[in-house]
Image (cartoon, helix red, strand yellow):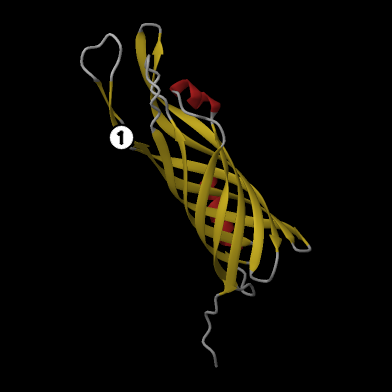
Amino acid sequence: MRVALLLVALLVATQDAHAEWRMGVSAYAGSRVLDERLDDYRWDVRPAPVLGLEGIARRGRAEFALAVERSSTEQALGLPGTTVAPRVDLTQVALRGRFHFFSRGPVAFSAGAGLGRMHLGWQPDALEVEVEGIAAPLQIDYAPVDTWRRELAIGAEWRLTHSLALGLVGEQSWFDLDTAHRAGDAIVDQNETFSSLDFRLHLKWTFAARTEATR
């Protein structure tokens, strides 16, 4: 709800009759740190690269972006005598809103929020594992998972030219996963919320979008 309200506020902020629309793209790279609690499920939670691309629309102080990004980690099996760790690919499409609340010279500071749909896929997605003490190989299947991801971010942008800017963004996000863990002699299934922390370096290019016909 807070994300939706912030996006609505950003939309209202664009209603400036004297501000021009600017369109553009932003390519970014950075590092993602996953929730330490995922280590309980044998995820590798060390910092991992994240890459992305945004399409941008900006008017006045408000900016909207449609982003596609990708990151990955590994999840160990945790079975005796096995060292296999399938790769977990995290692919997301997100809608983001940012408000540039303060600027000084060529530097501007922003705050924003986003909502994305994240797809988790395992490679390989099926394994046959030989386990000591079990005659037949153990079959393990990894079903893909789709979940919503909520984002809050702050950033700083340094304008290099009228059309080119370099930005640094810090982003905290949350997503939900169905999990299973042992509690005594029982297996407990529940839905848990996990977080991640991203730091990204953006290279942004924008241009004026002229909507009025030339007279």
Q: Secondary structure at mark 1?
A: loop
Q: Is residue 112 left or right of residue 42?
A: right
Residue toward you, 209 or 46: 46
Residue 43 lies, with reference to residue 96, above or below; the image says above
Residue 162: horizontal and vertical position, in percent? 68, 71
**Position of 58 relative to 177 (above/below):** below
Q: Could you tell me the amino acid type at mark 1? A: Asp
Furthest toward the left, the residue is 136
Residue 141, quarter of the rendered image: top left
Image: 116 above or below 15? above
Q: Is residue 14 visible?
A: no
Q: Residue at 42% of width from left, 28% of height from top?
A: 75
Residue 32 in the figure: left or right of residue 85: right
Dot 1: few (<14), some (14–19), or many (≥20) neighbours within 10 Å?
some
Say whether residue 63 is visible: yes
Q: Which residue is mark 1?
A: 125
Q: Residue at x 75, y 63 (%)?
A: 106
Choose between 9 and 94: the one closer to the eye. 94
State the residue at coordinates (51%, 87%): 213
Residue 65 pos. (x, y %)? 52, 58
- Left/right placement of residue 170 relative to residue 140 reads right
Residue 214's spot in the image, x, y percent?
A: 54, 90
Question: Where, by quadrant of the figure, is residue 179 drawn?
Answer: top left
Q: Position of residue 25 (x, y in %)?
A: 53, 63
Residue at x 55% of width, y 93% of height = 215
The foreground one among 85 and 97 is 85
Outermost residue toward the top?
Answer: 185
Task: Tell me: residue 55, above or below residue 184.
Answer: below
